[in-house]
Image: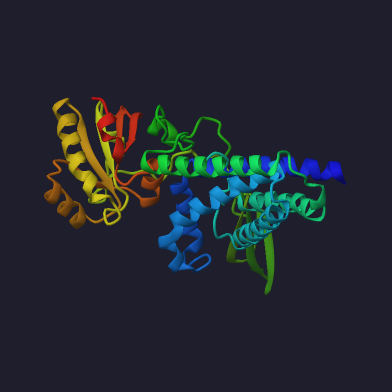
Amino acid sequence: MKYIVWISRIIVGVLFIISGLIKLNDPLGFSFKLEEYFSPGVLDLPFLVPMALGISIFVVIVEVLLGVMLLMGFKPKLTVWSLLAMIVFFTFLTFYSAYFNKVTDCGCFGDAVKLTPWESFTKDVILLVFILVLFYGRKYITPLFKDKLNWIIGGIALVACGWFAYHVLNHLPSVDFRPYKIGANIEEGMSVPEGAPQPVYEYAWRFKVNGADQIVVTNGDYPSVDGEFVDVETTLLQEGYEPPIHDFTIEQEGQDYAADLLEEDKLVMVIAYDLTKSHHNAFAGVAEMAKKAMAKGYRVIGMSASSNQMANELKKQYGLDFEFYFTDETTLKTIVRSNPGILVLQRGTIQQKVHYNDIDKLTF
């Protein structure tokens, strides 16, 4: 039992630290995922939406600290009970999401590793088994260091996590796992490679034949049946290739200008997914940046999911000398974890990407 506990201790501790650090690298992204869980269509807890960012930071720091404490063998009773409570809650959450098909990606490993709802639930069940081993064998979890050193290491881990969260929130994630990272070409990210897997569907056709129902199953062709067609039920058997970038448009008055704008040799995008939630003080710096960029021959555009009226009011207030286009809010949140944030592109390839706190670091 002692060796089984040690193996479980290492697996659970390392996994919690890795999972926590990946989410701590992008707490804003994890908060967006929590907002999805809190929405009326899922858990229906709208009062928690304004607290999503704070909850996300707290959860991921606790996740990392529990992993560190488990590996050190520090406060084993508190650690194991906390791990058990956390994994029971997340197992319920992933099962609920999978069974009712509510949230398609749990965000357990941020954007680094995408898991389907049932994969997330399976992962949590396996972790639950390991944590139950730790729970019943907690007497074998002994400290690696003296109590004072354990406190020091735990304190350092807490301070380091807090500093890291502060840093990435005021700049950008240290590691960008999203398809809009620097060096990525947006048009290439939207394309489907030749020979890519296609989705496979099964069709159950129902006909009335001599007064009775008859079901004929095909993979797409309309069956030759001497009867009256009633309906058809479609089942996805195998998902096809989905490009990493989809739902990307740059619209104005219902027309998509993405293809033309991504051909621009010098393009600056000012991303502000929701102008009501933007840090408006940053737009004074955005206006100065836009003037410098345009003087160097760059085309500058704004991209937002807000209304034209709000965009026009903002332009007037801060003297923004560029047009705003409409883009899906989720897409904008994915592009850059800053509201506003700035991208510099050359023929669709992202050359620079900065938080509004780092506008002065842009080079033209």
Q: Is residue 291 visible?
A: yes
Q: Is residue 89 above or below residue 213?
A: above
In the depicted view, which residue is nearer to us: 295 or 80?
Answer: 80
Q: Is residue 171 left or right of residue 363?
A: right
> Residue at image x 43%, y 62%?
49
Q: Quadrant of the C terminus?
A: top left
Q: How is the image coloured?
A: rainbow
- Residue 323 in which image quadrant: top left
Place of residue 245 in the rendered image (x, y in percent of width and height, measured from the top left): 44, 39
**What residue is rendered at 36% in x and 46% in y?**
332
Q: Is residue 211 left or right of residue 23?
A: right
Q: Quadrant of residue 163?
A: top left
Q: Position of residue 254 (x, y in %)?
A: 26, 51
Side of 35 where 70 appears, left or right:
right
Q: How many marks?
A: 0
Q: Residue furthest front?
A: 148
Foreground pick, 356 / 313: 356
Which residue is more in the foreground, 299 or 352? 352
Residue 263 position by quadrant: top left
Q: Residue furthest right?
A: 1
Asked if one can make out residue 200 in the rendered structure from this viewpoint, the answer is no
Position of residue 244 measured from the top left corner of the image (x, y, whole percent): 48, 38
Q: Residue at x 44, y 34 (%)?
A: 189
- Residue pictured at 26% horizontal, 35% vertical: 359
Horizontally, residue 146 falls left or right of residue 312, namely right
Is 364 located above or below residue 148 in the figure?
above
